[in-house]
Image (cartoon, coloured by chain):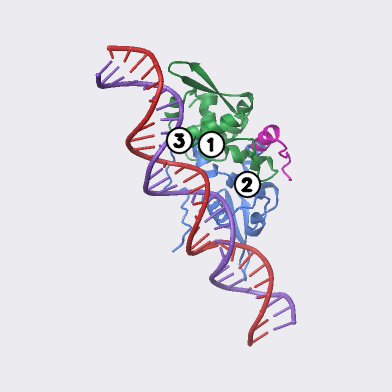
Chain colours: A blue, B green, C red, D purple
Amino acid sequence: MPTLLYDGPKNHTFRSRCSIARALEIVGDKWTLLVVRDLMWHGRHTFKALQESEERMPSNTLAERLQRLTSWGLVQRTLYQENPARYEYHLTDEGRSFEPVLLGIMQWGHENLEGGLFDPKI
Amino acid sequence: MPTLLYDGPKNHTFRSRCSIARALEIVGDKWTLLVVRDLMWHGRHTFKALQESEERMPSNTLAERLQRLTSWGLVQRTLYQENPARYEYHLTDEGRSFEPVLLGIMQWGHENLEGGLFDPKI
DNA sequence: TATGTTAACTTGCTTTTTGCAAGCCACGCA
DNA sequence: TGCGTGGCTTGCAAAAAGCAAGTTAACATA
């Protein structure tokens, strides 16, 4: 009886044909793109490292987001150590192809929101 | 006693210094960028026209999003007719500067989500 | 052998946000 | 006088977010 039963692309029906509307069904929330940011630029590849990001995402939300991103093929989860099992999360090519969008959002935020930082490394 | 009391940038405290995290506090949800899309490319400038978009945004959500976007200066609301009062919504320069991000998301969705359309006009 | 620690989640519960349907109001029109 | 229209608002149920605490398996230490 898993409680986290996000099923991803199988039997998902998009609400519209618009590519933007579709993309937002996957990444349209306050947290998902921060996970992508941390995987892309900040070297945070474990559950714990992601949890410790500045924004302090709740652990159940993080678990759900990682599962969603994985189910859509943007992230891959690999066992990097057995006994005890330890996992790493990495962007797939599909996930990495989100980089220009992230850069665009960062630039917009930097230009329009007071004091926002502009630096992928921060 | 207004129920919709979104207060916008005044006394808003961002959860982090990251420009991406900040931007997502404003546009990080499933609907806001669709409003921006409709204002940017689809010639939908009234409440009703926005309501009738393919994705069928609930009217209270639309009202809240328009108020949020307006309070942050991304959208301007103007009375284009008195008796009865009729309003138009238009992007400001700040709102229009979101175009590259929208194009990026559209392209990503088009390339990665089955059958998504790639055309600002659609 | 018992005790503690760590990573990676999971659970329970409260609060907030969404979503849906219906309602409201001012006016213009027939 | 009733009907239609635009621009919302309201009420309520359902879903998602957020918080704190708990769980599990495997070392590490004493």
The one of A77 and D18 positioned closer to us in this rendering? D18
Q: Residues within 10 Å of mark 2 (few under 14, many from 20)?
A: many
Do discs 3 and 1 belong to a common subunit? yes
- The amino acid type of the residue labelled 2 equals Leu
Do discs 2 and 3 belong to a common subunit? no
Q: Residue at x 48, y 32 (%)?
A: B63
Query: Marks 2/1: CA distance?
Result: 28 Å
Residue holding disc 2? A34
Q: Measured from the top left, where is residue B72 in percent x and y?
A: 61, 32
> Can I make out residue B88 in this image?
yes
Query: Marks 3/1: CA distance?
Result: 13 Å
- The amino acid type of the residue labelled 1 equals Leu
| Above-or-below relation of B53 to A52 | above
Camera-near label (2 vs 3) is: 3
| Residue contact at pointers 2 and 3, CB within 8 angstroms | no
Q: Measured from the top left, where is residue D26 in percent x and y?
A: 63, 74
Range covered by the magenta-colored residues: A104-122
| Residue contact at pointers 2 and 1, CB within 8 angstroms | no
- Name the disc covering residue B5, or none: 1
Q: Measured from the top left, where is residue D14 in percent x and y?
A: 39, 49
- Name the disc covering residue B95, or none: none
Q: In the picture provided, is B77 more to the left or to the right than D10? A: right
- The amino acid type of the residue labelled 3 equals Asn
Q: Residues within 10 Å of mark 1 (few under 14, many from 20)?
A: few
| Numbered disc 3: secondary structure | helix
Q: Residues within 10 Å of mark 3 (few under 14, many from 20)?
A: few
Q: What chain is tagged by disc 1? A: B
Residue holding disc 3? B60
Camera-near label (3 vs 1) is: 1
> Can I make out residue B118 in this image?
no
| Numbered disc 1: secondary structure | loop
